[in-house]
Image (cartoon, helix red, strand yellow):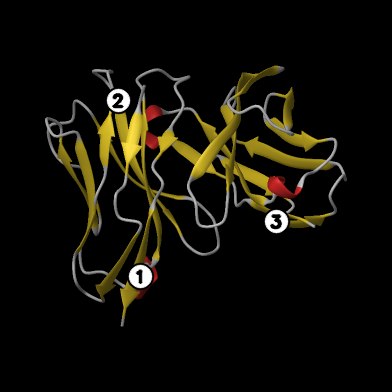
Amino acid sequence: SQTIHQWPATLVQPVGSPLSLECTVEGTSNPNLYWYRQAAGRGLQLLFYSVGIGQISSEVPQNLSASRPQDRQFILSSKKLLLSDSGFYLCAWGRVLTYGYTFGSGTRLTVV
Amino acid sequence: AQKITQTQPGMFVQEKEAVTLDCTYDTSDQSYGLFWYKQPSSGEMIFLIYQGSYDEQNATEGRYSLNFQKARKSANLVISASQLGDSAMYFCAMRGPNRDDKIIFGKGTRLHILP
């Protein structure tokens, strides 16, 4: 069966520090991968998606970047965090239309 | 462009009552999929139910059913016999017909089940 792993679960980082969040998928190949951000009590904002290795599409220009170095690995990064980068980050993968996306357990990022 | 609208930011419902969470959508695609997700306080996103645009019958999954009214572009989630564990944020979502189409989400409805 397919599983998705996302870490760390929580992170507190100072303003100006770098960021690296990792997401890996098991049990499938060539998945579409997605990074979403959710501000407190708000909906989900799509940040990046990838349909293959090295292929990244950005939905919202911002302080973040994404990379897909391997088929089942998706990384969200920042060189210098801003206070506004705080939020709940969710990784997801999708393949079969009828089941939508499967989400990771999320990373709660607080920039201080 | 596709759009999902959830007009109820919050709802309070007595335990064991049925709940209807509203969702309307807009799309120019003839083929599309509609989803509902549940997000408890832990933050995980749990897939609840799916409805295809060409499905003639409303989707059902246990206590969840999707009241699909295509002409009105409505896809309401109905939870029968609500339980305390149903307290969570609920998101309506939609996706186009192609594998690479992205899912778009509504802003969500926070459901509180009262004992």
User: Around disc 2, counting alpha carbons within 10 Å, would you say few (fewer than 14), some (14 to 19), or many (20 or more)?
Assistant: some
Q: Which amino acid does label 1 sit on?
A: His
Q: Looking at the image, which residue is at 72% across and 17% down?
A: A54
Name the quadrant containing residue B67: top left
Tag 3 residue: A9
Q: Looking at the image, which residue is at 38% across and 70% down?
A: B85
Residue B35 placement (x, y as % from top left): 34, 40
Task: Give the Cα separation between the discs numbered 2 and 1.
Answer: 30 Å
Residue B74 placement (x, y as % from top left): 19, 39
Relative to A17, say whether B63 is above or below.
Answer: below
Residue A16 placement (x, y as % from top left): 87, 44
* Residue depth check, mark 2 versus mark 1: number of the one nearer the observer: 1
Dot 1: element: strand
Counting residues from the N terminus, which is met first, the one under dot 2 or under dot 1?
2
Tag 1 residue: B112
Q: Is residue A63 left or right of residue A97?
A: right
Instruction: Please tell me which residue lies in front, B106 or A22.
Output: B106
Task: Give the Cα separation between the discs numbered 3 and 2.
Answer: 33 Å
* Numbered circles on residues, count: 3
* Chain at numbered mark 1: B
Q: Looking at the image, which residue is at 47% across and 62% down?
A: B40
Q: Looking at the image, which residue is at 32% across and 73% down?
A: B113
